[in-house]
Image: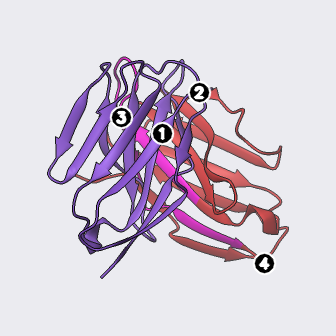
Amino acid sequence: DAGVIQSPRHEVTEMGQEVTLRCKPISGHNSLFWYRQTMMRGLELLIYFNNNVPIDDSGMPEDRFSAKMPNASFSTLKIQPSEPRDSAVYFCASSPQGSGNQPQHFGDGTRLSIL
Amino acid sequence: GQQVMQIPQYQHVQEGEDFTTYCNSSTTLSNIQWYKQRPGGHPVFLIQLVKSGEVKKQKRLTFQFGEAKKNSSLHITATQTTDVGTYFCAVGGSARQLTFGSGTQLTVLP
């Protein structure tokens, strides 16, 4: 079975440019999470969706960040304009429906470098 | 959301030695999950603990949930080089999101 699929795997761009990260969750999973991982701040939850609806975006650092989930099989995280401090590994994860906390399945991540 | 402290931040062991990482919370937890992230990889779910005093084993890994459900530990017996990575605990909030501990980075010296 396919896991969570993220693209691109690596992204290098200049500051000020728009960056779009993509995620395809595991089929049948109804919760989707976007995380950012850095050495300084560890693994931070940015936003999560349940049944395609954003539930909690309190982790989104600034208005430059936005996330959408137009359907159950696709989500995007956009940064516009990008800044060097946005450099990090961005993970998407999904989990199945159920009560309580279900295990989260992570994609391979997007390694983002803003020059 | 829930906050959890994880210690130690780093651990270097000789191959064959044991390893333990701890997670502590000031509040009672409904459950706790453990993940492993290999260098350059992504977090991978290992196990979930739900019951007070619960102990679960996966080969050389032993997971414990405290009686008060405020702490948990992961113990690896006789480490191997394949155990290298960062081990995270994660605790659930009121909804389905998780808050991850800061992780313990394990280095196993051959």
Which span is picked out in magenta? A90-113
Mark 4 secondary-structure assignment: loop
Asked if disc 4 and disc 2 are in contact, CB closer than 8 Å, the reply is no
Location of residue B58 in the rendering, given as x and y in whole percent from the top left corner? 17, 47
Q: In the figure, B71 relative to A73: above or below?
A: above
Q: CA distance from mark 1 to mark 3?
A: 28 Å
Label 2 with label 3: CB-CB less than 8 Å: no
The kind of residue tagged 3 is His
> Are the residues at dot 1 and dot 3 in contact (C-beta closer than 8 Å)?
no
The answer to whether one can see residue B101 in this image is: no
Amino acid under disc 1: Cys
The hue used for chain B is purple
Numbered tag placed on residue B23 in the rendering? 1
Judge depth for marks 4 and 1 and give the one in front.
1
Q: Amino acid at mark 2?
A: Gln
Residue located beneath label 3 in the image: A29
Q: At numbered mark 2, what does the secondary structure look like: helix, strand or loop?
A: loop
Of mark 4 and mark 3, the one earlier in the sequence is: 3
Between B20 and A69, the one nearer to me in the picture: B20
Res B62 → quadrant: top left
**Could you give the CA–CA distance between mark 1 and mark 2, rounded to whole angstroms?**
12 Å
The kind of secondary structure element at disc 1 is strand
Q: Which mark is residue A47?
A: none
Say which residue label 4 marks. A115
- Indicate the amino acid at tag 4: Leu
Q: Residues within 10 Å of mark 1 (few under 14, many from 20)?
A: many
Left or right: A23 with respect to B76?
right
Asked if badge 2 and badge 3 are on a common chain, one would say no
Quadrant in the picture for the C terminus of chain A: bottom right
Q: Residue A24, relative to residue B94: is it above or below?
A: below
**Colour that chain A carries in the picture:** red
